[in-house]
């Protein structure tokens, strides 16, 4: 691979990580003069906690920001014409940036909205089916975490049965594992009946 292409890939990976690491929830809270999400509610910086702590407007703005974080880097990578594996790695770097943000002492959100943005760009059909599963999970379980676990738990199977490449299915499995692991505290609270509803 030409040196210039390696340089482009390195920049795309770094850009993906940095874009993913932007704490949209904290920026929205600060702009609205609200509480620090890290010290309120569940302590998470994502849209669900923003909704609980600051209301619908903050929740929607945080959600949109986190989704767009996932869309932009993958879209840029696709336009550079790099091989699939590197586009997927840019998507993974973006999600990792959200999960382990240097602006939050390498802590972060649960990865749901940003991962959705990545998948919406890479494979819209897979993303929309996963979103429908999320909706059913939330409607039946009354918890955002139930919807997230259902949607992301199904991702590898959706990728496989919808005819995606082996690399994409492997990527979907990695993201599914990361997001589900970030929800382990939610699983503990669900088991003990202490999880907060939406």
Image (cartoon, rainbow, N blue to C red):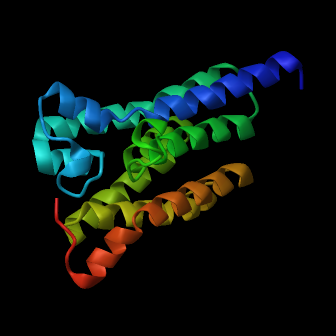
Left or right: residue 42 compared with residue 158: left
* Relative image position of residue 70 (x, y in whole percent): 47, 35
Quarter the N terminus occupies: top right
Give how far across and how far down residue 145 sits, in percent. 31, 64
* In this rendering, position of residue 67 left or right of residue 2: left
Judged left or right of residue 183, residue 42 is left
Quadrant (top left/top right/bottom left/bottom right) for the C terminus: bottom left
Write down the quadrant of residue 191 in the picture: bottom left
Q: Residue at x 50, y 50 (%)?
A: 126
- 151 relative to 140, above or below: above
Q: Determine the residue positioned at 41% across, 70% down.
A: 184
Give residue 2's quadrant in the image: top right
Report x, y in % for residue 123: 54, 42
Q: Which residue lies furthest to the bottom in this view?
A: 192
* Residue 152, visible in the rendered structure: yes
Percent position (x, y) of residue 156?
A: 58, 61
Give the camera-side residue of 116 and 54.
54
């Amino acid at each position: 691979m030409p040196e210039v292409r390696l340089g482009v890939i390195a920049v795309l990976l770094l850009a993906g990580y940095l874009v993913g690491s932007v704490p949209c929830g904290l920026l929205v809270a600060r702009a609205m003069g609200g509480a620090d999400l890290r010290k309120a509610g569940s302590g998470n910086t994502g849209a669900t906690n923003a909704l609980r702590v600051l209301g619908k407007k903050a929740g929607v703005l945080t959600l949109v920001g986190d989704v767009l974080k996932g869309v932009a880097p993958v879209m840029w990578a696709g336009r550079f014409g790099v091989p699939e594996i590197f586009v997927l790695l840019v998507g993974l770097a973006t999600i990792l940036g959200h999960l382990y943000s240097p602006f939050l002492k390498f802590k972060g959100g649960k990865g749901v909205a940003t991962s959705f943005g990545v998948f919406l760009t890479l494979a819209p059909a897979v993303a929309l089916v996963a979103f429908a599963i999320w909706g059913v999970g939330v409607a039946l379980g009354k918890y955002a975490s139930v919807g997230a676990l259902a949607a992301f738990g199904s991702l590898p199977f959706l990728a496989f049965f919808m005819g995606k490449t082996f690399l994409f299915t492997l990527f979907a499995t990695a993201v599914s594992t990361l997001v589900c692991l970030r929800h382990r505290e939610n699983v503990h609270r669900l088991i003990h009946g202490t999880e907060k509803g939406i």
